[in-house]
Amino acid sequence: MLAIVIPYYKSTFFEETLASLAKQTNKHFKVYIGDDASPDSPVFVLDKYKEKFDCAYHRFEVNFGGISLTQQWERCIDLSEDEEWLMILGDDDVLGENVVEEFNAFIQDNKRDVDLIRFNLRVIDSDGKFQSDNFEHRINESANDLLERMFLLKETITASEFVFSRAIYSQNNGFVDFPLAWFSDYATWLVFSEKKGFCNIKQATVYWRLSGINISSQSSNLSEIKLKVKSLFLFIHFLQVHFRIDSNKLKKFTHAKLHDLLCNIPFFQSARILNGEFFKFKFNKIIVFEFIFKKIKRKTVKTYEGICAT
């Protein structure tokens, strides 16, 4: 049986999440909702769906999401019972109506020895409009295949479109813990698929919301950006320890992620953050120095063009 675990904090799109669960064509699942001491209680909206599917709700009195999001995920999983399979679903994400049906059919019809399963993913905005295309995947892929997808920087990879066995979760003592859980899902899926790979269910889709209010949206908050940069460096170190990686691919990936993280703040603030985090880790000096040099060069060219224009 499948346990769908929802770490809850925001109510903005939560009813859409619950509605997608109520529409599942196969009801052989149980939902566990862990309220992270949210100021916005979901009890009223939960009452509307209490007859629609099997659900357990628990409110935690201490907020963990602001300290360690992975610890919040893990204590929500601790609410679950003896279900063999687990899924972490964002409180603003949506399941296609046949997700559970296709999952159960896959488990019953296939004898593949895997611990990780992935559905199709589509990115939606606050209005539910598509922000990404479907990507074609093979049914069977390896951890290295998933890493290549990460390096390609073309598709979104999240926590919500994966189902994992309780066995692999327990064997690895939960999730890889990075600040804000930034890249924690990337690292965890690589760990969970390292030995047996993973399978793609291509007939069903999970819709992941990029709304501007979730942690994955671009931010100008310096404290948040600093933690995300720290997590990026931790993830790079994780990759260097666990995988043999082409240095050019690693550099391209790192530069792209740093650009995304730092594009909304002034250069001197970017340099301060990189200086503070870089010297804590003391690895990949060339990668970071090249990024800073490119940023300085780009800034110099823009200044020169501005002078010429006047």
Image (cartoon, rainbow, N blue to C red):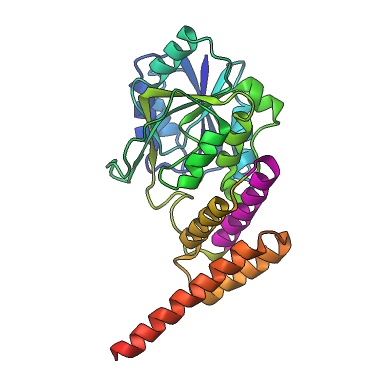
At 50% from the left edge and 29% from the top edge, which residue is drawn? 162
Magenta segment, prevailing SS (helix, strand or loop): helix
Residue furthest to the bottom in view is 310
The x, y position of residue 175, in whole percent, is 64, 36
Q: Is residue 147 visible?
A: yes
Tell me where residue 4 appears, x and y as whole percent: 50, 25
Q: Residue at x 65, y 24 (%)?
A: 168
Magenta stretch: give its range: 223-244
Please say if 306 is above or below 291.
below
Q: Quadrant of the C terminus?
A: bottom left
Image position of 276 with respect to 142: above or below: below
> Could you tell me if residue 32 is visible in this image?
no
Q: Would you say 1 lies left or right of 175 here?
A: left
Residue found at x 57% / y 26% = 197
- Residue 7 located within the stretch drawn in magenta: no
Q: Is residue 29 left or right of residue 290?
A: left
Q: Residue 243: where, in percent of width, then height?
A: 65, 41
User: Relative to the observer, which residue lies in front, 100 or 10?
Assistant: 100
Q: Residue 271, image x and y in percent?
A: 58, 72
